[in-house]
Image (cartoon, rainbow, N blue to C red):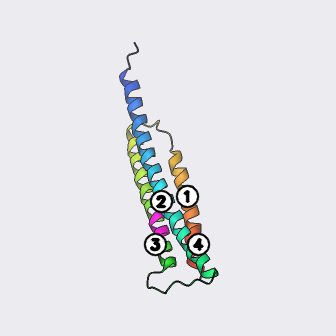
Amino acid sequence: MVVATSNTATDLAVDRTRLAHDRTQLAWVRTAASLISFGFTIYKFFEYLHSKGETVEPRYFGPRKFALLLIGIGLVSLLLATIQNRREMRALRQHHEHVPNSLATLLASFLAVLGVIAFVAVALRQ
């Protein structure tokens, strides 16, 4: 039977806490990816219908605005989740210096770049 010392138990608790923060960040990344891709898909679907000659009656809040709204919400949620994750990791590192950097933040950054590209693509197309 192996008895964990207080340092080992503390290190394992810090690892569990860090992994919990990473899982939360990845859940937000998944949600943001869904919002961004759904917004872009809606835009492309209605663009396809328009190119086929099928018109959608004009409304105040059309497919393009709805797509921009969804992509924007996805980007904002990604930004807020990343800020929260960095704040929590900074607080954890104040007590335990050996906490490694998160790859979830790197993934969030890549998704943010793709989201900005999708937002600009939809915003600039008429």
Quickly name the residue at label 4: 44
Quickly name the residue at label 3: 69
Marks 3 and 4 sit apart, C-alpha to C-alpha, by: 15 Å
Residue at 42% in and 48% down:
24
| Left or right placement of residue 43 versus residue 23 in this view | right
Q: Residue furthest left?
A: 6
| Left or right placement of residue 105 versus residue 12 in this view | right
Dot placed on the residue nearer the N-terminal end, 3 or 1 = 3
Dot placed on the residue nearer the N-terminal end, 4 or 2 = 2
Q: Which residues are magenta?
A: 68-74
Q: Position of residue 94 (x, y in %)?
A: 39, 42
| Left or right placement of residue 4 versus residue 112 in this view | left
Q: Amino acid at mark 1?
A: Leu
**Mark 1, residues whose alpha carbon is within 10 Å: few (<14), some, or many (≥20)?**
many
Q: Amino acid at mark 2?
A: Ala
Marks 4 and 2 sit apart, C-alpha to C-alpha, by: 18 Å
Q: Are marks 3 and 4 in contact (CB under 8 Å)?
A: no
Near-viewer residue (125 or 10): 125
Q: Are marks 4 and 2 in contact (CB under 8 Å)?
A: no
**Mark 4, residues whose alpha carbon is within 10 Å: few (<14), some, or many (≥20)?**
some
Q: Are marks 1 and 2 in contact (CB under 8 Å)?
A: yes
Quickly name the residue at label 2: 32
Q: Nearer the viewer, mark 4 or mark 2?
A: 4
Q: Nearer the viewer, mark 1 or mark 4?
A: 4
Q: Residue furthest top?
A: 1
Marks 1 and 4 sit apart, C-alpha to C-alpha, by: 19 Å
Quickly name the residue at label 1: 111
